Amino acid sequence: ALEARQQTLLGQIDQVATLKVQSLSDQVRHIQASKRVEQLPPDLAEEAGSPDAVFLCADATITFKIGSEDFLEKIPNFGNITEASTYASRSVCRGPALGTLKVGNPSFLSLLASDKDGQRRVEGGDEVEVVFSDPEAFSDLNVEDC
């Protein structure tokens, strides 16, 4: 009975794997057909581990339906909506903190945020998450948006 159950489960796993491969293949075809991709520069493609890696040239789209309930009155409350987005794959970190650190010596690094075309962002305020391999080893951490 256990062997029969094992065979049933293995068959279901194969079925799920086949469907996943098909779904991913469909997504790749859709992305390539959309013409919203470009090849990664060689250094980023090498980092990605594939010479065929692509960069998706897509931002989130905000659509408004004029005539919706009190929509026009609420526009001023939206704040500033721009067409620029920060792309982590086009942004870089620089500074001495990326090298060897010594106990008791302050250091720093700068994150240069860039858009999908690799151009530096002119406004700050993006949410950035930094993860330290050994957070207990650091103290007096400060973040400055400049």
Image (spheres, rainbow, N blue to C red):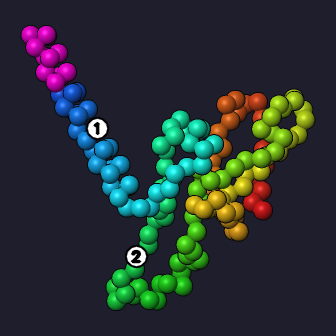
Task: Answer left or right for 123 relative to 80.
Answer: right
Where residue 120 appears, x then y in whole percent?
A: 69, 62
Q: Which quarter of the image is occupied by the C terminus?
A: bottom right
Q: Quadrant of residue 85?
A: bottom right
Question: Where residue 63 is drawn, which disc sits there?
Answer: 2
Residue in the foreground of this view, choosing between 123 and 115: 115
Percent x, y for residue 82?
57, 74
- What residue would you read off at disc 1? 21
Number of numbered callouts drawn: 2
Q: How far apart are the alpha carbons under marks 1 and 2?
A: 32 Å
Above or below, 82 relative to 42: below
The N terminus - image quarter = top left
Say which element carries label 1: helix
Residues packed near mark 1 inside 10 Å, few (<14), some (14 to 19) or many (20 plus)? few
Q: Which is nearer the N-term, disc 1 or disc 2?
A: 1
Say if residue 15 shows up in the picture.
Answer: yes
Q: Residues within 10 Å of mark 2 (few under 14, many from 20)?
A: few
Residue 71 shown in magenta = no
Camera-near label (1 vs 2) is 1
Q: Which residues are magenta?
A: 1-11
Residue type for callout 2 = Thr
The rendered magenta stretch, by its main secondary structure, is classed as helix
Write the residue at 64% across / 59% down.
118
Above or below for 138 versus 70:
above
- Against 79, residue 14 (above or below) is above
Q: Position of residue 129 (x, y in %)?
A: 63, 47
Taking 40 as reference, is 29 left or right? left
User: Which residue is pictured at 62% across the width and 53% down the height?
Assistant: 90
